[in-house]
């Protein structure tokens, strides 16, 4: 959507923030690097703090530059050479994140729904749906994520309340236990921080929000909802299973849903409802990440048509999902570290840079 001008409201921004991040962070909670889960809920709180700072910087930029395209402003301040290097890195990181999310989506469906279906036939409809959504533009994606976000939050809140009130829940498992060495703790902290990595897509989205909207309130509310769900799910999983049992489960939260679902009656297969909504969540974040990748590519190659860019990139999703082995825990460290740099460290530095440039230019004028 190249000609969209300031048409989204605060709720759209909230839904976009929420949907850009909340997928894998819930499906595989409380897993972190090397299975260090005993203090997962506490680190989820601590590692979210820098991302609240990041959304504050984005809202500060929004007020100072009046909805101007962030990357065009960045180009005017850095020059074309540095600009190309920065965008190339962000594009590659975004494309790889999309590849990883589509592979995770395929793994989720193959493991819990279609165990004997070939990977190609599982991922094909998802890739077609994501590509069509991105082709039709940001408005289509935002309406899609806004339509499901309320139902998603209600469903998760229902399972959370159900888990906390379960007779199997035991608070004795909740206090954090530091039983690992420092290196494992730091690696797991990077994994926890990487769960919020989708926030970086707000750099492309923020320019389309109406000027009068309270952007920080909307973005921080979305991030706060993500944090509360992450922490609550981690607490419920640890409280019900304990860390010794949870570490051996493929997906503790899905096992939790299956364990608290009544064995008879209308709610007998609520686990399928949960999985259905979770598939939708993966599709949403894939759409957002893929849109962000195409948006950045359009910044570098404005003369190329969007359809050409989509057709050029989507084969990578098929290749990655079909031929790259799925790495559940081991091997994520490098990926998580890159997500942390591309989605938090670099964007914060760039935001600080353009904000300071604006202040310096105002001081020179005055």
Image (cartoon, rainbow, N blue to C red):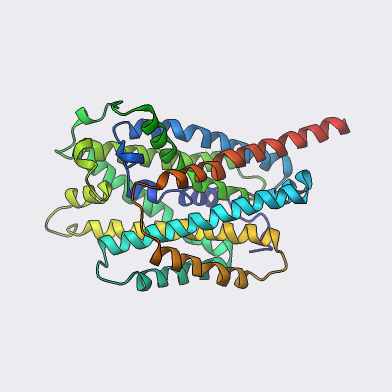
Residue that appears at 42% across and 49% down: 22
Q: Is residue 265 left or right of residue 157?
A: left
In the foreground, 239 or 366: 239
Residue 31 point in image, percent of width and height = 32, 42
Look at the image and tell me whether residue 63 can be seen. yes
Q: Quadrant of the N terminus?
A: bottom right
**In the image, is 112 to the left or to the right of 53?**
left
Q: Position of residue 137 (x, y in %)?
A: 58, 65
**How many labels sit on residues?**
0
Quadrant of the snapshot with the C terminus:
top right
Front in this rendered view, residue 184 or 294 = 184
Where residue 256 sits in the image (x, y, percent)?
22, 47
- For residue 11, above or below residue 359: below
Residue at (72%, 39%) from the top-left corner?
A: 354
- Asked if residue 218 shows in the view, the reply is no
Using the image as rendered, state which of residue 54 and residue 78 is in the foreground: 78
Image location of residue 168, percent across then percent down: 15, 38
285 vs 105, left or right, is: right
Quarter of the view holding residue 55:
top right
Residue 266's image quarter?
A: bottom left
Q: Is residue 252 above or below residue 45?
A: below
The extreme left residue here reads 264
* Picture residue at 34% right of the left edge, 34% below the top: 41
């Amino acid at each position: 959507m190249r000609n969209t001008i300031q048409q989204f409201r605060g709720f759209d921004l909230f839904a976009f923030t929420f949907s850009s991040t909340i997928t894998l962070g819930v499906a595989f909670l409380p897993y972190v690097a090397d299975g260090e889960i005993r203090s997962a809920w506490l680190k989820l709180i601590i590692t979210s703090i820098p991302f609240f700072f990041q959304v504050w910087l984005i809202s500060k930029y929004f007020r100072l530059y009046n909805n101007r395209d962030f990357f065009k402003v960045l180009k005017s301040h850095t020059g074309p050479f540095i600009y190309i290097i920065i965008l190339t890195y962000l594009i590659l990181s975004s494309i790889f994140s999309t590849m990883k999310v589509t592979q995770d989506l395929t793994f989720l469906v193959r493991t819990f729904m279609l165990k004997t279906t070939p990977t190609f036939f599982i991922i094909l409809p998802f890739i077609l749906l994501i590509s069509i959504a991105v082709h039709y533009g940001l408005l289509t994606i935002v309406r899609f994520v806004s339509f499901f976000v309320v139902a998603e939050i209600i469903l998760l809140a229902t399972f959370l309340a159900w888990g906390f009130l379960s007779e199997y829940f035991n608070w004795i498992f909740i206090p954090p236990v530091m039983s690992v060495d420092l290196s494992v703790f730091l690696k797991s902290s990077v994994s926890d921080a990487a769960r919020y990595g989708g926030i970086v897509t707000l750099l492309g989205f923020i320019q389309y929000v109406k000027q009068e909207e309270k952007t920080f309130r909307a973005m921080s509310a979305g991030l706060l909802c993500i944090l509360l769900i992450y922490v609550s799910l981690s607490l419920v999983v640890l409280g019900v299973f304990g860390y010794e049992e949870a570490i051996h489960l493929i997906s503790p939260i899905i096992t939790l849903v299956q364990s608290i679902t009544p064995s008879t009656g209308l709610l007998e297969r609520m686990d399928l409802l949960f999985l259905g909504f979770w598939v939708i969540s993966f599709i949403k974040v894939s759409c957002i990440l893929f849109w962000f990748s195409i948006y950045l590519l359009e910044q570098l190659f404005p003369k190329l048509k969007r359809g050409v860019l989509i057709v050029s990139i989507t084969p990578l999703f098929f290749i990655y999902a079909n031929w790259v082995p799925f790495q559940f825990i081991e091997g994520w460290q490098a990926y998580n570290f890159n997500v942390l740099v591309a989605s938090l460290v670099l964007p914060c530095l760039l935001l600080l840079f353009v904000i300071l440039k604006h202040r310096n230019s105002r001081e020179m004028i005055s």
